[in-house]
Structure formats: C-alpha cells, structure tokens
Amino acid sequence: MSPAQKPKTSAKGLETRDRIVDVAVRFIARNGARGTSLADIAAEAGVSQTGLLYHFNSKEALLNAVMDRHLAFSEQWLWGEGPDPGIKIVDIIAKHMASWPNQHDSKVASLLGMNTVVLGENVSPDTELHQRLVDGYRTTIDRVTATLRSAQERGEMREDIDPQLKAMEIIAFCYGIEAAWLVDPNIPVAAAAAQWAAQQTRQLATGPATS
Amino acid sequence: MSPAQKPKTSAKGLETRDRIVDVAVRFIARNGARGTSLADIAAEAGVSQTGLLYHFNSKEALLNAVMDRHLAFSEQWLWGEGPDPGIKIVDIIAKHMASWPNQHDSKVASLLGMNTVVLGENVSPDTELHQRLVDGYRTTIDRVTATLRSAQERGEMREDIDPQLKAMEIIAFCYGIEAAWLVDPNIPVAAAAAQWAAQQTRQLATGPATS
DNA sequence: ACAAACCGACTGAGCACTCGGTAACCTCTG
DNA sequence: CAGAGGTTACCGAGTGCTCAGTCGGTTTGT
C-alpha cells in the first residue's frame, strides 16, 4: 500500500526520501516541528506536498524519520571516537564544540540544534515524541555513567565522585552551551568548552598534581 | 481605545488580566506558545476568547506579558539573596534546585520551564521574542561575570579562571539540568546540583585546602 | 502491463482576530 | 440623591487564513 508498510522503494525513491528528511531537519531546527509546515518542506525539497505524503504517510512519520537521523548523528558525535573514552569524554565534547563557530549554517548545526528545539516542543508527557526524548536522555546518561565508572575501575578517575551525577552534569553542560549558542552564535563557545574541559579533567583525574 | 494604549484599568480588570497571564504561563510551559491557542487559555481563565483579546490586543501582546512575568521571576530566582553573591552563586543555584522535586506541578515549575520551551521556539532570529532571549542571556552572563570578577577582587576566587567563561558554564549547567528535569522529573536533580556546587566551590575558592 | 513515484484540487479542522453588540460601574450634574 | 452619559469589561457569531491529510488521477521505470 504505502512505502511505510511495504518498503519496495527504488533507488530514486530512497533518494527523494533522503532529501526530504534533509530539508525537514533544517526547517525543524530553525522553526520547530510545529512551526514548519509540510508544504514548506515539500517546496524546498522539490516535491509537491502530496509527493511528500507519499513517502511519509503523516507528519508524525516524517518527524520520526527526522528523529532517527538525529539519533544516529548524536551517537556518532559522542561515541565516534570509541565506546569507552573514560574521562576523555570531556575532551571529545570540547573538541567538537571548538568547531561550532565555523558551522553555524551547516547540516551539522541543524542536526545539533534540533535537540533544543524538539525538546522544547515535547516537554509535555502526552506528546508523541516525549518518550523518545526520555529514553534518549536516559541511555546517554547511562552510557556516560558507564564509561566514567570504568575509568574509576581503571584508576583513571577519582573514586569520590558519583559517576551518574557527573554524567548528568556533563550532559547538562552540553545542552546548555548548545542552547546558548543557538540563540546567539557569537558567544565564545570554543573557549568556554576548553576551559570547562581542562578544569573537569583536573578535577576528575587521579593524577598526583592536584595543585 | 484599548487598555494597551490607555491603561485606565480598574481593579477587576487587573485581576482578570493577571489571571489570564497565570494560565498562559502554565499552558505555554507545557505546550509552548505555538502549541497553545488563545481559546485554551481563555477557557481555563474563565473568560471568552474575545474577553481575553480585550485585555491583550494580540497573542503576541500576551506573550510579552508572559515573558515579563518570567523575567521578574528569573531575576528573583538568581539574585533574590543579594546583588553580589560572588562564588556563593553556585550554592544559591543548588539550593533552588534542591526544592524542584517537590514542585513539579507548581507555578514555580511553570515559570522555570518556560525558559526551555520558549527558547526552543525562538532560536530563529526572525521571531518576535528572539531578541528578548538574546538580551536576557547576555545580561545574565554579564551579571554573573561581574559578581565572579568582584569575588576575584575580594580574593575569594582564584585568579586563573576566566569569569566570563565560568559564567557561561554556570548558566549552561542551569539550562541543561532544567531541560533534563522538565522531560523527566524523576532524575536526581537535587543530588546532581549538590555535587556540582560542592565541586565548583572547591575549584573556585582560593582556600588553602586543595585536598 | 504493473507497480512505484508523483501531482492538482479538494476538504475539514483549528486558529488569531474582527464586528456589533450588552451589562455593569463610575461620575458629574440638576 | 436621581439619573443621564460615558467608560470599562465582557460576549456570540462570524471571517479568512493556514495546515494536515484525502482522492482520483498521470507519468515513469522495469
């Protein structure tokens, strides 16, 4: 009936599908899902609104495809350099943030910015995407907690710091800086991230120099 | 003509006006401005939609009144204990966060949560409220920076930490924790805030005990 | 010839906002 | 202190727009 149920999609079909999601990510990152109409997306993607609805049976279906892409990107963003970076995770984050100033208009920025925008639209538990956000947050926290805990076991991180609470702090910092950067791209993100990472490393590490 | 231009409002008028803003804050904090209709707000406030539009000439006017209330609240939240708390600012923040778990459904929670929701809806620079958000962020950063700097001058804070970047970090943490708590009120906000404040204090203070 | 890919025209719901009223209340005057 | 006149506070019934989704088609690739 429809490709969502019977995905006998051809190469060309997949390509348009992909293009639509691309455009949707851009629009949603700027105006939110509620602030973006299917007509807008369709026009920019070079199809009619009906053509869009052929590929995604409803707005919600498109939204989910967009979230899938966002999830894949975030995954790569945090864990692209290995599944267990330990306390190096703060350096990874700072390194990524250092490149933000150059790419405020890029695809990367859209994929990142979606976070803040979609989250804001779905704080109420009775929206469709809310559960996805809760699950996403929990798994991220769990993974960061796990890598910090294993760093403690390896003796690379101080034992008197609760890994879960520290994970929450790290993710909160990411969210907060991202939000601030979105509303005002001129703030010194790179410097803030660098100072933060340096201080976190000093605080977390077991090294002899506590000075 | 209308109360917005000629505010000859009576006591009763002010009361309804106030009630409308109250309700609007609650709705917007949950569903965003775009996700809330004037009809919803009016019904909950016990007036007709036309009655609402008598007090606020447009949705945008109501939005601005809501933002005014939010601003006043945030002001009190951060600086209620004095205009120059120095590094104690992190303790103030942690203290406030400690009380969040008890008030997820309260007025306070709505006023707080608005931040995340409204910010997400206005990342694009061509929305009406965007400039207000940018200005609000900047002044907050400036004030935190100033109090940290004066702490340094008083010798209460280490000199080798950049106050502005630290201010950004502090505000980012607030944003991030708030966002996380909004989507999932069950997370241990109080504990995370307590550990964060303790570690920040140890890191910022000039005290002799660096452990 | 058959399915996949796509379109134009339509529909119905939801929305912010307008228009033409009415009722309560205050104020100034005879 | 009656009551006329004006102002404030509100309402019901529209209006025009935007938007997600439907329907009945046509084109294109294999």
Image (cartoon, coloured by chain):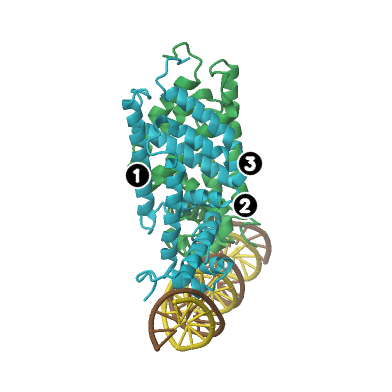
Chain colours: A cyan, B green, C brown, D yellow
Q: Are marks 2 and 1 on the same chain?
A: no
Q: Which residue was labeled with disc 2?
A: B125
Nearer the observer, B43 or B130: B130
**Mark 1 or 3, closer to the camera:** 1
Q: CA distance from mark 1 to mark 3?
A: 31 Å
Residue B161 drawn above or below residue D30: above
**At 45% across and 58% down in the image, what residue appears?**
A66
Residue A13 drawn above or below residue A142: below
| Residue at disc 1, secondary structure | helix
Q: CA distance from mark 2 to mark 1?
A: 32 Å
Instruction: Specify the label residue A139 is tagged with.
Output: 1
- The amino acid type, in three-letter code, at marker 2 is Pro
Q: Quadrant of residue B23?
A: bottom left
Q: Quadrant of residue A163?
A: top left
Residue B193 visible, this orientation: yes
Residue B165 in the image: state x and y as whole percent: 57, 30
Instruction: Specify the label residue A114 is tagged with.
Output: none
Q: Residues within 10 Å of mark 1 (few under 14, many from 20)?
A: few
Q: Quadrant of the C terminus of chain B?
A: top left
**At 65% across and 56% down in the image, what residue appears?**
B6
**Mark 2 or 3, closer to the camera:** 3
Residues at discs 2 and 1 in contact (Cβ within 8 Å): no
Q: Is residue B172 left or right of residue A57?
A: right
**At 34% across and 37% down in the image, what residue appears?**
B188
Q: Which residue was labeled with disc 3?
A: A186
**At 46% across and 29% down in the image, what residue appears?**
B92
| Residue at disc 3, secondary structure | loop
Nearer the observer, B205 or B11: B205
Residue A55 drawn above or below residue A79: below
